[in-house]
Image (cartoon, grey):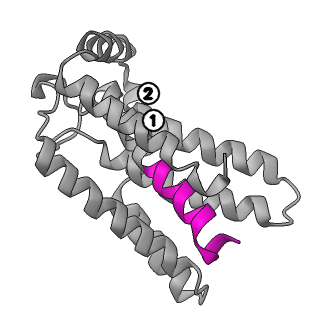
Amino acid sequence: MKKKFLFMIPLCLFIIDYFLIKYQVIQPIDWFIYHLVQNLKCDFMTSFFKLCSTLGSTWFYVILVLTLVILKNKKDIWVGIHLLIIQGMNHIIKALVKRPRPPQIYHLVKETNYSFPSGHSMSAMIGYGLLVLEVQKSSLKYKKVIEIFLITMIFLIGLSRIYLGVHYFSDVIGGFLLSLSYLLFIYYNTSLYT
């Protein structure tokens, strides 16, 4: 398979995830994982996952990108553009799908819009994913350690959204898959990363 079509794999998995949600096939798995993660609640974990969630928020990326652009790294404006595109896609899909969030009684942070796909998961995959691609091309001494840290952050941000009670597992997976598809598309089909 040609690499330029790799983006189709996570895109197809995203579509499958959507239909599993639509026809409530994945609902028992969503609730099982949701309650499993909810049982981990303690003050330390709540503080930790609120921090992780903040590091995956749109405002965090806006501040990061603006800082990088001010420091005159022109390529970083593309990170901002990709984040805007992903957030636009997220809002459109949420408005079309209209999946309700988990019951508010479980929410540890305030969220008012729909649940699928997770915007934090989408932003984390793009924001930190693009950083992983940059680190891979760099000559940094500890680049494997940095890559592992960045990939871990992606998954912690997704997990934080379940822990904080505002997303189901399939929302987070859907967000990861759609953004991974986008990431693979821009990586293998544009001149930005070649």
The residue at which mark 1 appears reads as 48
Residue at the limit of the structure toward the front, as seen here: 1
Q: Going by the image, does 133 lie left or right of 185? A: right
Please, is residue 154 above or below residue 45 in the view? below
The residue at which mark 2 appears reads as 44
Q: Which stretch did the figure color magenta?
A: 179-194
Q: Going by the image, does 108 lie left or right of 37? A: left
Residue type beneath disc 1: Phe
How many numbered discs, if any? 2
In the image, residue 27 lies in the stretch drawn in magenta: no
Query: Callout 1: 10 Å neighbours few (<14), some, many (20+)?
Result: some
Residue 175 percent location from the top left of the image: 37, 43
CA distance for labels 1 and 2 = 6 Å
Residue 113 appears in the picture as rendered: no
**Residues tagged 1 and 2 counted as in contact (Cβ below 8 A):** yes
- The main secondary structure of the magenta stretch is helix
